Image (cartoon, rainbow, N blue to C red):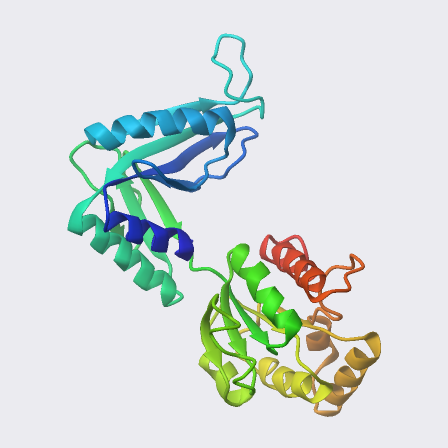
Amino acid sequence: MIEFYRQFAQWLRQEPIVLATVTRVQGSVPREVGAKMIMGSDRIFGTIGGGAGEAKVIQHALIVLETAQKQSVEIDLTGAPQRETQGICGGKMQVWLERWSGEVAIALVQSILHLLNAGRTATLVTPFYADCSPYLVHHPESTPNAFIETLQPPPTLLIIGAGHVGEQLAKVAHLIGFQIMVHDDRAEWANSQRYPQAAGIFNGSIAEVIEQFSAHSNLYVALVTRGYHYDLAALECLLKRDSVCAYVGMIGSEKRVRQVYQALEKMGVSESKLKGIYAPIGLEIGALTPEEIAVSIGAELVLVRRGIAS
């Protein structure tokens, strides 16, 4: 979501942009309510599902871009014989098209970005009236004839250990929507050249770094360090956090994992807390290379994020 609005802000500084938002769905459809796509005169970012249905939205968006007249577009994916062929997923989607332009629109997108970057939600109200523009509210409330959505900040993935696996994991996790943070005490490994995706890079003590995320409620952590002692130091801090991490995964052989667990048990860490660690990290897909291991970890992150893994 942050990357989408960053792109949105950049384009808005150059030209008017049409924002397409899925506002209602029925039955089986390719995208969820709130899915978005932006369109300029000759470029598109994001998707509301692809195929003939999206092509129809693009056609209407070009009209909105020219006239500034908002409109709602229905995409029929039921395969009904009386309709133009738009798809056969089985459901229907309603998509709202609205042109955004000028300093007011830019300021609104910047406000959204500010909230999301701070780890806070942003509630956006889009009125379905010709003379009303979208706006932010602090407290969601029922608003007639409007689409109200709560934009969530992206989950943060703290990669502890900036070696080869960490470098590839940053690429994969950034691609699937995580905000990337990296820690390693070696500045020659943890730096912006090797980690251009990272929103933050830390070379200090692990205890100080984890303290900075003490209030973060949606923190994922991947321990891909170069040794047992680094895992132990990180876990000792992570397991003491007041708020439980959404995910903690640790790389290593079963022997290395067992050694870490035994050391933590001697420190008084309960067995229930140890059961919450994903170790060895990643789904079992026979991964060998850093790239393959990163894919296996990324897949596990998606499982946890979507509530499929526990």
Q: Is residue 73 left or right of residue 208?
A: left
Q: Residue at x 57, y 23 (%)?
A: 90
**Residue at the top extreme of this rendering:** 82
Q: Residue at x 74, y 71 (%)?
A: 279
Residue 17: % across, % down: 28, 41
Residue 10: % across, % down: 30, 53
All told, the count of numbered labels is 0
Q: Say if 175 sits above or below 241 in the image.
A: above
Q: Nearer the viewer, residue 289 or 281?
A: 289
* The C terminus: image quadrant: bottom right
The answer to whether residue 5 is seen in the rendering is: yes
Residue 100: % across, % down: 24, 42
**Residue at the right extreme of this rendering:** 255
Q: Residue at x 79, y 86 (%)?
A: 262
Q: Is residue 286 left or right of residue 247?
A: right
The answer to whether residue 69 is seen in the rendering is: no
Q: Say if 53 sits above or below 134 in the image.
A: above
Where is residue 99, by image quadrant? top left
Q: Say if 199 sits above or below 149 in the image.
A: below
Residue 122: % across, % down: 34, 56
Where is residue 249, by image quadrant? bottom right
Q: Nearer the viewer, residue 123 or 100?
A: 100
